[in-house]
Amino acid sequence: MPKITYIEQNGTEHVVDAETGVSVMEAAIKNMVPGIDADCGGACACATCHVYVDEAWREKTGKPEAMEESMLDFAYEPKENSRLSCQITVTDALDGLVVRLPEFQG
C-alpha cells in the first residue's frame, strides 16, 4: 500500500497506508487525519479537502482539471501547488506522497 504523509499547519505529520484507487481525501478521512473536512464527500463541489502538494510530487499528481481549478478559487490561500485531495487518485506511483494542509479549509 502506498504511504501518504499529511502535514498539518503546526508541523504534525500523519503517515497513512492508502489503498490504491481511493482518493487522497478518502485515505485521510478513513485514517482520521485532522484538517480534511470533505464537506461534499469528494464530489469536487467545495474546497474543504484542499492541500498543498509537495513540490517533489507535483508532476506525479498532475494538474487540476477545469472543474477543480474553479473550486480552488474558494480554497483558503490557494497556491500554484494547490489541489483538492478528492481529485488525486492514489496509485503505486504516489507511494511517499507528501501533502501539507492549509491553516483553514474552505
Image (spheres, rainbow, N blue to C red):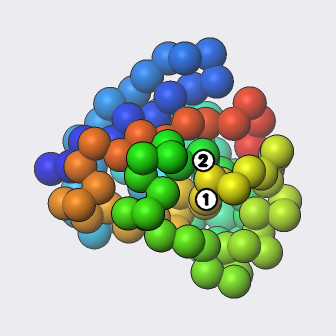
User: What is the x, y in percent for residue 73?
Assistant: 84, 64
Q: Which residue is mark 2?
A: 51
Mark yes or no: residue 53 visible: yes
- Residue appearing at x 61%, y 60% in the figure: 84
Secondary structure under the numbered disc 1 in the rendered image: strand
Amino acid type assigned to the residue bearing label 2 in the image: Val
Reply above or below: 95 against 15. below
Q: Residue 82, how many percent across, how many down?
A: 65, 54
Q: Amino acid at mark 1?
A: Arg
Q: Residue beneath label 1, please?
A: 83
Most extreme residue toward the bottom, as rendered?
66
Q: Residue at point 32% right, 30% down?
A: 15
- Callout 2 crowding tier (Cα within 10 Å): few <14, some 14–19, many ≥20: many
Marks 2 and 1 sit apart, C-alpha to C-alpha, by 6 Å
- Horizontally, residue 89 falls left or right of residue 53, namely left
Determine the residue positioned at 38% across, 63% down: 60
